[in-house]
Amino acid sequence: MSTQNPAKPLHGRVAVISGASSGIGEASAEHLAALGAKIAVLARRAERLDDLVARIEKNGGTALALAADVTQAEEVQSAADQVEAELGSADLLFNNAGVMLPAPVEELRTDQWRQEIDVNITGLMNVIGAFTPQLVKAAGQRGVADLINTSSVAAQNIFPNFAVYSGTKAYVTHLSRHLRVELGPKNVRVAAIEPGIVGTELQDHVTDQGAQDWLAGSKETMEWLTPEDIAETIGFIATLPPRVNLQQVTIMPTGQPS
Ligand code: NDP
């Protein structure tokens, strides 16, 4: 430890990031790579991942693209096997893939409810299922590992017409608290990060006019967070001394009231 390059505090670590083809995951991949970790980036859009890997490698990093759909457990398990074989056991999992599709519940957008539950809950669990054995193994060998789940301020506060999304994120935060107690004794730190509004592609998928108007209005009245703001927070969590587990981080645009 004492010989470690202070500019590369994650040197020797293997980080897996889901939802890495855009937004928060993409920025986090670049930041954790700059901090010295080997990076495996997972999402469905293979071309975006290949571009990201090329950028990381151009900057002297090591990266691996994993084209997989988190809702498909077998695809995620194959990706996990590939990480173990090519980079070694993952000791940092940023479990971040997600979708947000708000609409009044009376519109009965059951297709969108299902997609949110499939990606934000089932997908999140598929990733946890595939990588937890590696996290525990790595923590046993290296003394620390991190599981960081992306929740949202929607897990805490009330946003009309965001009920299903908010419910999925409340699941993520509560799950994380439980897993921290289970895995902490094995030196796996578990954290939930709860951002307020971050400017990413997340908002582009919103189809409900009311929610679109609300988001557009909020952009006029406050400066949204950037993906890099979240990436730096992930880097901060992962570089804390092994005895320190930042359990839950709510990170808001300064101008966002709730
Ligand atoms: P983006 O839409 O930019 O990124 C979402 C990522 O999730 C993409 O890389 C996408 O990749 C991936 N993804 C979606 N579905 C799947 C799937 N089935 N399998 C694999 N990957 C999938 O949005 P953000 O960066 O904003 O979102 C990241 C996380 O942050 C989400 O969990 C979101 O809920 C959360 N969050 C975002 C906030 C914001 O205001 N932006 C606020 C609070 C939380 P691909 O399409 O290539 O598969």
Image (cartoon, rainbow, N blue to C red):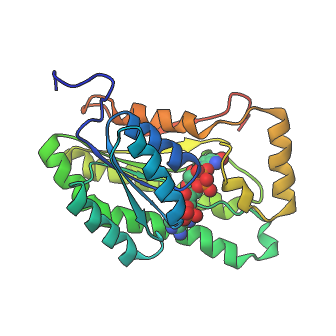
Look at the image and tell me whether residue 134 can be seen: yes
Q: Position of residue 212 (x, y in %)?
A: 82, 55
Residue in the picture at 80% in, 40% down = 219
Quadrant containing the C terminus is top right
Look at the image and tell me whether residue 120 can be seen: no
Q: Position of residue 170 (x, y in %)?
A: 55, 55
Q: Quadrant of ligand 1?
A: bottom right
Towards the viewer: 51 or 3: 51
Q: Position of residue 108 (x, y in %)?
A: 77, 77
Please indicate whether residue 125 sits to the left or right of residue 254 in the image.
left
Residue in the picture at 77% in, 55% down = 160
Quadrant containing the N terminus is top left
Towards the viewer: 84 or 86: 86
Residue in the picture at 42% in, 42% down = 58
Q: Which quadrant would residue 199 be assigned to in this image?
A: top right
How many numbered discs?
Answer: 0
Please indicate whether residue 2 sits to the left or right of residue 159 in the image.
left
Most distant residue in the front direction: 58
Most distant residue in the left direction: 141
